[in-house]
Amino acid sequence: MSKPPSIPLPTHHPDADLLMRYAAGTLPAGPALVVATHLDFCPVCRRQVHAWEAVGGALLNNQRPEAMAEDALERALARLDAPLPTARMRPKTEPKVDMALPPALRQRALGPWRFVAPGIRGRAVRVDPAEDYKVMLFRVGAGMAIPTHGHRGMEYTCVIDGAFSDAFGRFASGDMAAVDAAAEHQPLADPDSDCLCLIAVRGRLRIHSLLGRLVQPLVGL
């Protein structure tokens, strides 16, 4: 009986600082979702996150215990005696789970697919708007390119399916990229298949092409 084909490991990873902040829970929701998606593909980075979490747990264990208020037990028992809030009605149907997506994304609230540019579609991923990050799934048709653009803030990308290339290399399934405001690039999907990416962006993009600027208000990036 033949073995199933092995899945190549990602070759582009978040740096140690990003993994540490993810493990500590200090990354904003947008970048954290991109890192979590990468972790679904990458056992190497998962081990690093587990190591950071273990370090954090050890530090907490070494903290000096804080004295509790004298009435802490009474207040806790009083809360147990308080009436329960009225239960909300559950929806008749559960949210549809997209099993084609990595586990980190499967039960996220997703908007409808929308036209972005010829050969490119996008759909919003809901995160906390107060954190000033826009998160979207982009599907770029085989051989198509996202318009050349720069950034006014950080951009985090994880490839879910397919691959793209830009000035920083080739990024395939599971690969993650993080670029700052100094970067300008034009991601180009491989010619043999569509490329599906998760992108978290802070601040509006600086798009250089006329077409890109015309459709930018429709996308909201």
Image (cartoon, grey):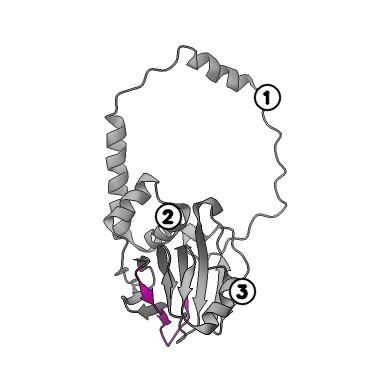
Q: Residue at image x 42%, y 58%?
A: 31
Mark 1 Cα-neighbour bin, 10 Å: few <14, some 14–19, many ≥20: few
Quadrant where the N terminus is found in the figure: bottom left
Asked if residue 45 can be seen in this view, the reply is yes
> Where is residue 26 drawn, in percent x and y?
39, 47
Q: Earlier in the sequence, mark 1 or mark 3?
A: 1
Q: Is residue 41 left or right of residue 122?
A: left
Magenta-span inclusion, residue 58: no
Q: Residue 83 has which mark?
A: 1
Residue 32 circle label: 2
Mark 3 and mark 2: span between their CA atoms? Answer: 24 Å
- At label 3, the amino acid type is Arg
Magenta highlight: main SS: loop
- Confirm whether residue 47 shows in the render: no
Real-space Cα separation, disc 2 to disc 1, in angstroms: 36 Å
Range of the magenta residues? 182-196
Q: Secondary structure beneath disc 3?
A: strand
What secondary structure is found at the residue carrying circle 2? helix
Residue type of the residue flagged with mark 2? Ala
Q: Nearer the viewer, residue 56 or 173?
A: 56
Type of amino acid under label 1: Pro
x, y percentage for residue 220? Answer: 57, 68
Measured Cα–Cα span from mark 1 to mark 3:
46 Å
Q: Nearer the viewer, mark 2 or mark 1?
A: 2
Identify the residue under disc 3.
Answer: 114
